[in-house]
């Protein structure tokens, strides 16, 4: 099983600041099979990024993804109030043996 | 607009059977896979398995194989997640979701169904 470890577990930032979230895989995965999701309290997750760097439909361009091999990054260039949420990475290359990271909680400072 | 509307919260006892549903609309139901994802505070998000409504091909994450059953009803564009004998550890929020292929990101999610198993 591929284990995804996200860091930090929580991140406190102010609106307007830049957020950098990390997702590390226990073994190398194809960037094509890495996605990022956002989840707000009481809501289902929402797809932000697929294929490590492709924004999903309707996702603002302040969200960007990068990485390869075992190290992937989600960057939010300038935080808006609505961006404070929990973010998850997912690998799906061995579907249905998909796995999610444990999440990074982005909090308002 | 793609919509996945799940059935309401359930409370059940250990050993009971249960069926929760996910009604799809706004797209060709038989052309996309339906995934089921479990969420708990302890283990986070867990991918349970996927089913293709076109021919009911089903693939389970080995961690959930034999624990649940996925099914669909094409006539009502509804997917189902079934348990034959619930355990307290099945207490969780369950999401249905849509993905384009077996190996694909989840592009749309249902609102979730809270299942509570308690004696």
Image (tube, grey):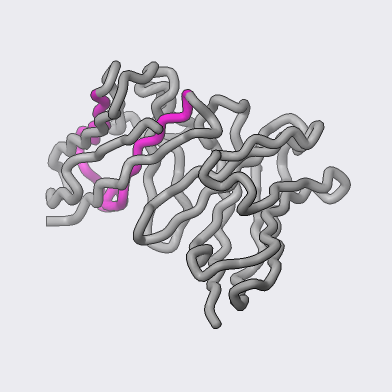
Q: On the picture, is B92 further left or further right than A103?
A: right
Give me the residue at 36% from left, 61% from top.
B41
Q: Position of residue A33 (x, y in %)?
A: 44, 23
Q: Position of residue B77 (x, y in %)?
A: 79, 47
Q: Is residue A19 above or below residue A32?
A: below
Quarter of the N terminus of chain A within the rendering: top left
Residue closest to the eye, B63 or B94: B63
**Bounds of the magenta segment:** A71-93
Give me the residue at 62% from left, 28% from top.
B100
Q: Is residue B31 above or below residue B74?
A: above
Residue closest to the eye, A41 or B83: B83
Give me the residue at 39% from left, 40% from top.
A100
Give me the residue at 21% from left, 36% from top.
A21
Q: Position of residue A77 (x, y in %)?
A: 21, 33
- Residue B97 visible here: no
Q: On the picture, is B54 further left or further right than B9?
A: right
């Amino acid at each position: 099983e591929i284990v995804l470890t996200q860091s930090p577990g929580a991140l406190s930032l102010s609106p307007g600041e830049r957020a950098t979230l990390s997702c590390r895989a226990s073994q190398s995965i194809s960037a094509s099979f890495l996605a990022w999701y956002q989840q707000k309290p009481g809501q289902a997750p929402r797809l932000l990024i697929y294929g490590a760097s492709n924004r999903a439909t309707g996702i603002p361009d302040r969200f960007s993804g990068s990485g390869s091999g075992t190290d992937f990054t989600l960057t939010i260039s300038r935080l808006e109030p609505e961006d404070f949420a929990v973010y998850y990475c997912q690998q799906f290359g061995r579907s249905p043996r998909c796995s999610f990271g444990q999440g990074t909680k982005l909090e308002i400072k | 607009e793609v919509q996945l509307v799940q059935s309401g919260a359930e409370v059940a006892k250990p050993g009971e059977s249960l069926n929760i549903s996910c009604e799809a609309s706004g797209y060709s139901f038989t052309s996309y896979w339906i995934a089921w994802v479990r969420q708990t505070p302890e283990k986070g998000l867990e991918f349970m398995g996927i089913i293709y409504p076109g021919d009911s091909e089903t693939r389970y994450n080995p961690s959930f194989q034999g624990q649940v059953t996925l099914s669909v009803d094409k006539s009502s564009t509804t997917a189902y997640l079934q348990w034959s004998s619930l355990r307290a550890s099945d207490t969780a929020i369950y999401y249905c979701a849509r993905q384009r292929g077996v190996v694909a990101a989840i592009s749309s999610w249902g609102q979730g169904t809270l299942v509570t198993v308690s004696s």
